[in-house]
Amino acid sequence: MSFVFQLAPTPSVPVLGQAERFPVRRIYCVGRNYEEHAKEMGFTGREPPFFFLKPADALVVVNEDETGQMAYPSLTQNFHHEIELVVAIGTGGRNIKAADAEKHIYGYAVGLDMTRRDLQNDMKKQGRPWCIGKAFDESAPIGPITPKALAGDVNHADIDVSVNGAVRQSSNVSKLIWNVAETIEHLSSAWELQAGDLIYTGTPEGVAAVVAGDVLVGKVAGLGTLTVKVNPAK
Ligand code: MN
């Protein structure tokens, strides 16, 4: 097969302990999935989960023991970090029940759902799509994928992010409103999941702004660490 210009490479994420990489198809994200974060965003209660997407080429892929690089994005004055557990889907399916979700999971990673908060808030007020606030270039830093057999109990893992060494967000994955299995059940009722899909599962409270020069270190206990630096705008 030939194309009118060269194909872009498939985005992919390194896997701890092996040479083969995880090829990425789609990035799904869950909104407001920790109660204290929902509150800081002005909401309360356990509403049904809702989803948005980022393009696969918005990933900033960072190996263990490396510092990733992302540019401060255009158009925003309020560029926020959201530390998240990321689920990597290894076997697809539709209408997956929560009780069966585990076997569809390949592994887990630490991710940052970087957000142009001012633009997202403008879009919310106007009832418009969130794309410009959420799905921009370099909006999805991700660390290496840990295969599930090596990951320990991620459903009860501490999750945190520090900026320049100071902790900004610190919680536990057990505080998810919709846990990983329930999220897969909801998501797979709306879209057919496929191998290569990533799910950013939501962020705990403490989201805040970063500026050029800041270094973010994201952790979920038992998974590879994510380190990324914010560079000046392009
Ligand atoms: Mn998020």
Image (cartoon, rainbow, N blue to C red):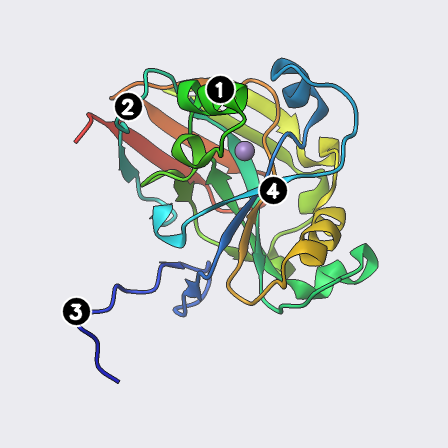
Residue drawn at x 31%, y 43% as measured from the top left: 66
Q: CA distance from mark 1 to mark 3?
A: 37 Å
Whichever of labels 4 and 3 marks the residue nearer the N terminus, that label is: 3
Q: CA distance from mark 4 to mark 3?
A: 33 Å
On the image, the x and y values in percent for residue 114 come to 42, 32
Name the image quarter holding residue 206: top right
Residue drawn at x 62%, y 68% as measured from the top left: 92
What's the mark number on residue 121?
Answer: 1
On the image, the x and y values in percent for residue 233 come to 20, 27
Q: CA distance from mark 2 to mark 3?
A: 30 Å
Q: Which amino acid, by three-letter code, is at mark 2?
A: Leu
Q: CA distance from mark 1 to mark 2?
A: 13 Å
Q: Spot the residue most to the bottom.
A: 1
Check disc 3 and report the residue beneath it.
Answer: 5
Check disc 2 and report the residue beneath it.
Answer: 75
Check disc 4 and report the residue beneath it.
Answer: 51
Q: Which amino acid, by three-letter code, is at mark 3?
A: Phe
- Asked whether residue 21 appears in the rendered view, the answer is yes
